[in-house]
Image: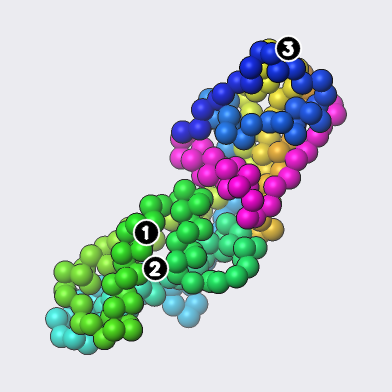
Amino acid sequence: MFRLNPLPRSFVVATLAEFASTFDLNSLSADWMETSMWGWIRTRTEPVSARQYLRFAELDIEEGDTPRHLVNGITNAKRALHLRMEDICNGFGFDKLGGSRSFPSMVKFISSLGITAPRLLVRLNKLRNEVEHDYVLPARQDVETFLDVASLFVAATDRWVDRQPCEAESFRNTGSVGEGFELANMRFDWERGTVKLDFREIGSGLTGPRVTTEFHIPSDEFFICARFAVELDGVR
């Protein structure tokens, strides 16, 4: 969890703009921020959804252990994994990165957001590549493992499909004593790959002066904010 690290008392901020420009993103904390608005991620269901591919894979290995059943089973599980991974990545702004849309690049992106651990996904991709590119016949145990983890990934990411954090607000003063300023809220436009942080004078309410800072993919600042938003939504 991100912890609040107050600025040293000797550090004096004279203006709201200075406070906004020197704000330490690593001080973002669930101790004084909470998710206040959610959206959803569009997932493809036509012609076949991720869950349908999973069901196909289950039927493949239920029906037999022949090479056809095993290869089809792992291929359908892979399709489910890829389809959901692409949808989740796109929902969090992956398109704004540009460049390769390969499986490794998607794994790296998801890891940067803190959505899931990447090591297992990399191992599964290695097995998939062996089947598709090296003509290795997978063992039934490997197919079952692949299917189990693909199913877990789809289930685990359902929460982001239905409840993607889009805005967080502070419910407690985030400025150190004597500064008189605070971070009011954090707003994401995932489709555009941007996050905006609004700062204000403490006690100024909705009509007081504000200063906004904005970060874009692929900046480190964007990913710090995105990881915090993902973690924050799992706290409350």
Task: Provide the residue span drawn in magenta.
Answer: 208-236
Q: Mark 2 = which residue?
A: 81
Tell whether 191 sits left or right of 203.
left
Q: Is mark 2 in CB contact (under 8 Å) with mark 3? A: no
Q: Which residue is mark 1?
A: 153
Tell me the CA gap for discs 3 and 1.
47 Å
Q: Is residue 196 above or below residue 44?
A: above
Viewer-nearest of labels 2 and 3?
A: 3
Q: Residue at x 45, y 61 (%)?
A: 107
Check whether the beta carbons of the residues at disc 2 and disc 1 lie within 8 A of each other: yes
Judge the density around disc 3: few (<14), some (14-19), many (≥20) Cα neighbours within 10 Å: few
Q: Position of residue 198 (x, y in %)?
A: 74, 35
Distance from Cα at disc 2 to Cα at disc 1: 7 Å
Q: Earlier in the sequence, mark 2 or mark 1?
A: 2
* 216 inside magenta stretch: yes
Say what amino acid the circle numbered 2 marks. Leu
Residue plotted at (69% across, 58% down): 192
Rendering coords of residue 30 (x, y %): 53, 30
| Residue, disc 3 | 178
